[in-house]
Image (cartoon, rainbow, N blue to C red):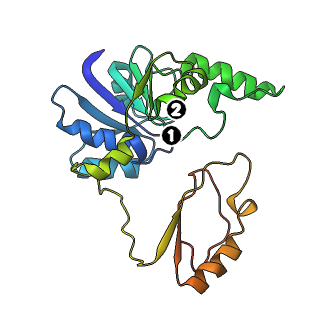
Amino acid sequence: KKEGLAVFGTSSGNFADNSKYLFLEMQEEQEISPVWISPDQDVINMLREKGFRADKSDSIKAKYLILRSEIAIFDHALRDFDSWMPLGAIKLNLWHGFPLKTIRTGEKPDGKLLRLLSNKYSNLFFKPDYFLRTDKKYDKFYRDSFNTAKTVHAGYPRNDVFNQDIEGKDILATEIDQENYIVYMPTWREDKKLDEIVELEALDNIFESLKYTLILKPHPYTEIDKEFENIS
């Protein structure tokens, strides 16, 4: 393992979430050599143009860096790294949300073979050495759900950035140009589309009458089939 080499990634492949902001923060650490790994060549090109180290996950160089890395940092799972490749590295799961429901290995198989095998696979290859949690109250919940005995109590990098001056934090950020708006960021509902749970058309009409805009940021895996005048 190469001392100080840290690979970063997200399950979506985008330059986003907790991994993004910790990656940017680590640029100032002399003892850490951060490299962003992504399957998206556009993301790699964008980061390289801005002077950051980045490599496409299916390249020979990326695989070599992952195998040599001392630290592997992600915010959901090791999908960007080829699950077995960071074996031997210190794996830190930054996660990305609040435990409103059972997750990962805490989910009951319900007699489904696929779910049972998925949980076993997670225990073998996705087990983090450390897990970031923002509240000590849920320490046992996270340790049980992610099959790890070690947790780190700290803030989420994506939230801490609001009180920090980190170079590059505005990369891919979108400025809201509306004066009157409300932000709605619903969590993941398995096997359900957002418009099957929330009456978006009715909300659109309400916001039109109020002269407001709803800034909707759904879960990355959530699909929305329609476009609305007052929901963006």
Q: Residue at x 33, y 22 (%)?
A: 69
Q: Residue at x 36, y 68 (%)?
A: 175
The picture places residue 152, in percent across and down from the top left corner, at 40, 25
The picture places residue 46, in percent across and down from the top left corner, at 31, 53
- Left/right placement of residue 86 relative to residue 217 reads left
In the rendered image, the quadrant that contains the N terminus is: top left
Disc 2 element: loop
The picture places residue 207, in percent across and down from the top left corner, at 59, 79
Q: Residue at x 52, y 33 (%)?
A: 79
Q: Residues within 10 Å of mark 1 (few under 14, many from 20)?
A: some
- Left/right placement of residue 159 relative to residue 139 reads left
Q: Residues within 10 Å of mark 2 (few under 14, many from 20)?
A: many
- Residue occupying the far front of the picture: 137
The picture places residue 227, in percent across and down from the top left corner, at 62, 74
Quadrant of residue 72 within the rendered picture: top left
191 w.r.t. 3: above or below:
below
148 w.r.t. 227: above or below:
above
209 w.r.t. 42: above or below:
below
The residue labelled by disc 1 is 11
Q: Residue at x 30, y 39 (%)?
A: 23
Tell me the amino acid under the disc marked 2: Ala
Query: Which residue is more in the foreground, 40 or 78?
Result: 78
CA–CA distance between discs 2 and 1?
A: 6 Å
Residue 77: give its label: 2
Dot 2 or dot 1, earlier in sequence: 1
Assess whether mark 1 and mark 2 are in contact (beta carbons under 8 angstroms): yes
Disc 1 element: loop
- Residue occupying the far left of the picture: 30
Tell me the amino acid under the disc marked 1: Ser
